[in-house]
Image (cartoon, rainbow, N blue to C red):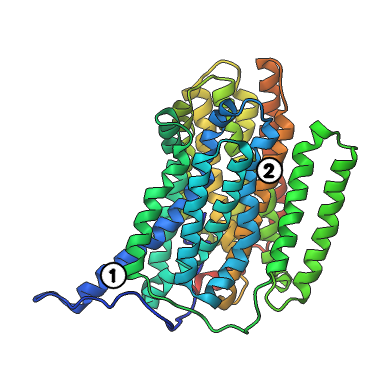
Amino acid sequence: MPSATEIRPRSDEPATGQGPEPEPEPEPGASVMGVVTRRRGLVFAVTALGAFMASLDLSIVNVAFPALERSFPHDPRASLAWVITGYSIVFASLLVTAGRSADRLGRRRLFFIGLGVFTLGSALCGLAPSVDLLVAGRFIQGSGAAAMLPASLGLLLGAFPSDRRSQVVALWGGIGALAVATGPSLGGLLVSGPGWRWVFFVNLPIGAVAFLVGRRVLAETTTATSGARPDYAGVVLVSVTLAALVLGITEGPTWGWSSARIVACFVGAVVVGAAFLRRSARHPEPVLDLTLFRSRSFSVANAATVLYAMGFFAVLLGNILFLTGVWHYSILRAGLAVTPGPLVVAVVSGPAGRVAQRIGFRTVLLVGFAFFALGLTWYATAIGLHASYVTRWLPATLITGLGIGLTFPVLSAAAVSSLHIERFGVGSAVNQTARQVGGAIGVAILVVILGNPRSPASALAHFRHLWAFAAAMAVSSGLVTSLLKRGRAGVSAASAAT
């Protein structure tokens, strides 16, 4: 979920190609500046709606997961997990290439393509009579979201002068944070009311509004490129790599870790992954620009992001499953119970980025990892079979929320801090990709850890193992982050864009 510290404004870019309908002449007494301001406000609203939908589906579907298990009782959790991991895999695989395609083909065009694909995927998810079609709809949603996000940011930056871009990018990122924060409570309301299908149907009216308004106010922009086509074959290779890895992890307990199918999954992931890296090193417009990793800060921050996301996304889903499965909360109550954490994240993220620019990324990140690990340790040691929300669950939620707010946006800023300003966009996209890769692997590991417990006590033990795993990932991220330089090294580069 992008924020002000994650994606930096680019330099001024001339708008080319066709635009929307001509702006109306100002009415008597109205200034031209007033018309321009209203148009810019509408551009912000449309692009923010795209970011809102893509970010909302990162959290709202987790709340619906228990309802999906009840609707498809004959499908194992490993199969249902693809509803979440499928979205992450496609999103991660396409994000960088979609950004380059938007620059090459036109951001307005790709935004509408992404919006249409995402809305179509949402409709298919809502209508899906089987898990297979539901997962297919999530694949389609992920591809639409990957097209929408970079295109919407490019359109937003093109509509505002350079001295206002930092402000509007911060607001744009804040809309994404709001979507993640409201996802659990909104999802709980929808699932408890009209049903889990409305978790997906809710995107249809939002998409319709964005399309109708966007047709009138979005101007086409492109950026001069080298002429080389993005590496679409590389997209296929990285998608197959991630899918094989996730499949091997999720089905390992069922098929047997030493079975031929599981071994084939892991071997295939290694072989195809190696082919992907080889292709990325040679292609002029690769999915993954390996030259970025010459920067120590970039390499360290992205490695920490993958590890951290593995624990974060596992807990994001695991906590909902615990509240509904062990404490027997309703889905609405569970959604409301986890909402304080995302709210803390939304409040803390902005100040955390500013503090990191003053004192350095490393210090803020290490403090954030410590808080996140502390909150998870609280879950693992203080939470029992009997519900005790205010005295046991809420403190852990607030502590972990503080840790997340201090880490995720600052990790993204650290990743691009040493890059040239012209590479901030692709650097941020790679970091977003690292987050989604870690999330897909984390959810797959969740399936393995939780298993199929036969008693409440056994279920509690499995959830404690899950929280311990997430805490270990936080500690591992901290160890990797300790390789960052001390103090303000690299901060000036990140600050230059704001």
User: Is any part of residue 498 visible from this angle?
Assistant: no
Q: Secondary structure at mark 2?
A: helix
Q: Is residue 191 left or right of residue 250?
A: left
Residue 109, above or below 13: above
Q: Is residue 245 left or right of residue 168?
A: right
- Which of disc 1 and disc 2 is earlier in sequence? 1
The CA span between labels 2 and 1 is 42 Å
User: Is any part of residue 166 visible from this angle?
Assistant: yes
Q: Amino acid at mark 1?
A: Arg
Q: Which mark is residue 353?
A: none
What residue do we see at 61% from left, 47% from top? 136
Residue 285: horizontal and vertical position, in percent? 67, 76
The local crowd at label 1, few if under 14, some if 14 to 19, many if 20 or more residues have their Cα within 10 Å, is some
Looking at the image, do the residues carrying marks 2 and 1 touch, with CB atoms under 8 Å apart?
Answer: no
Numbered label tally: 2
Q: Amino acid at mark 2?
A: Gly
Res. 28 image quadrant: bottom left
Q: Secondary structure at mark 1?
A: helix
What residue do we see at 44% from left, 43% from top? 201
Residue 436, above or below 324: below
Seen from the viewer's position, the closer of residues 498 and 342 is: 342
Q: Is residue 351 left or right of residue 491?
A: left
Q: Which mark is residue 442?
A: 2
Q: Which mark is residue 39?
A: 1
Seen from the viewer's position, the closer of residues 218 and 34 is: 218
What residue do we see at 55% from left, 46% from top? 404
